[in-house]
Image (spheres, grey):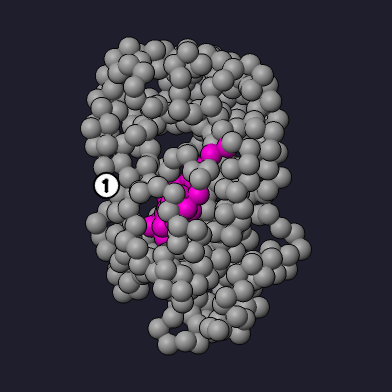
Amino acid sequence: MAKIQEIRCIRTRPGGYWAIVKVVTDQPGLWGIGSANDVHHADTVTTAIEQVIAPRLIGRDAAEIEDIWQSVYAAAYWRNGSILNTALGAIDMALWDIKGKEANMPLYQLFGGKCRDAVPCYAHASGHDLDALVEDIERYLQEGYPVVRCQLGSYGGGGFVDAASAPRPRNARAADKVFDDELYLEAIPAMFAHLRDKLGFGPKLTHDVHEHLRPHNAVTLAKLLEPYRLFFLEDVLPPEQIDWFRQIKQQCTTPQAMGELFVNPQEYVPLITERLIDYVRVRVSKAGGITPCRKIAALCEWFGVHTAWQEGGDNDPVNQAAAMHLDLSSTSFGIQEENHFSAQELDVFPGHAELADGHLYTNDQPGLGIDIDEEKAAELLTASGPSGTAEDRRADGSIVRP
């Protein structure tokens, strides 16, 4: 069998936060790639891979994916952190890529074959006002998206008030706008009342709270949205307050989606086994790769929960490909978050998934079916790039957790 000969990271996109791991074997022309992208800690993840994990794996049998995963997971002693998971997840993806190439099969075939013809995705619609939002939703529906997420502007949109008109302390920090829970509780149900009036109940609609609300207000919002029959309500609670999902489930039937900030199985396992959420939304790389995500999908199947692997604008085509293969082969699949890339970015990744008419399509090449052009990747790399999350605050100056 092929032995691991080299593990290195290829950095691309502004700031180099797209870190693609390449695991090279001793077999000529046989390698695999995986996603280690981290928009905030790319240097840290890259260091962990190349200086800490890689030396432990050189010479190991590339086929021993489960054993390698367990070995790396336990080797750091402290585990379930976002940095380790991302590093481990990238190597895990690359090893599965190698296995698929050795078997001359796309990964979904190794996982048992297709459960669906293509992967349905949900789009991200937004607008500065209700009319603009309706127009954006209709555009995505016409493109063939089966589900559309609806936002008034950015995250927290509908809950912001001009700072000058808010009751703020006299020593308040400079701010143009502040977030108000109660205003959000008024605006978002009114938004969905308008959308259902204009669009009817045919379109499947979601909304992302992005953890902006206090927990008791999250319960209230879920109840208020029940009449509008959402496909799901996303991230109504922050990870620190997931026990409040019990309160939500006791109060209403609004489907709940949660998990893009989860890195620890103890966060999502109770939510699945107690049926407190309806869609689990961990990112494949942040969960630790394909190996643990296959187990999450299997667990979901037993408890009637669905997967909706997280993508988002900072993610890359390699992580998207990994999610797509899981989606194609899992009966617990629910919906896939879409992601758009520029033509220049896609040119870096030959064999990337095709996004068309609201669905992802695989090319049926062996392994992940995607590769990286290192010369073109270098052309996209610049010194500066994204470095922080938007910081929202309430009138008194306190942080609203994203």
Q: Position of residue 351 (x, y in %)?
A: 32, 64
Q: Position of residue 93 (x, y in %)?
A: 51, 64
Asked if residue 257 lies left or right of residue 243, the reply is left
Q: Position of residue 266 (x, y in %)?
A: 71, 45
Q: Is residue 219 visible?
A: yes
Asked if the stretch drawn in magenta spans residue 153, the answer is: no
Which quadrant holds residue 49? bottom right
Residue furthest right in the image: 77
| Residue visible at 59% across and 60% down in the picture | 291
Q: Which residues are magenta?
A: 305-330
Q: Secondary structure at mark 1?
A: strand
Q: Position of residue 251 (x, y in %)?
A: 63, 16
Asked if residue 123 lies left or right of residue 259, the reply is left
Asked if the stretch drawn in magenta spans residue 314, the answer is: yes
- Comparing 378 with 284, the one in front is 284
Q: Residues within 10 Å of mark 1 (few under 14, many from 20)?
A: few
Which quadrant holds residue 218? top right
| Residue visible at 34% across and 34% down in the picture | 146
Which quadrant holds residue 316? bottom left
Callout 1 amino acid: Ala
| Residue visible at 62% across and 74% down in the picture | 64
For the N terminus, the quadrant is bottom right
Seen in the picture, residue 382 relative to 198 is either above or below; the reply is below
Asked if residue 61 lies left or right of residue 351, the reply is right
Q: Which residue is mark 1?
A: 356
| Residue visible at 41% across and 57% down in the picture | 321
Seen in the picture, residue 68 relative to 5 is either above or below; the reply is above
For the C terminus, the quadrant is top right
- Comparing 267 with 278, the one in front is 278
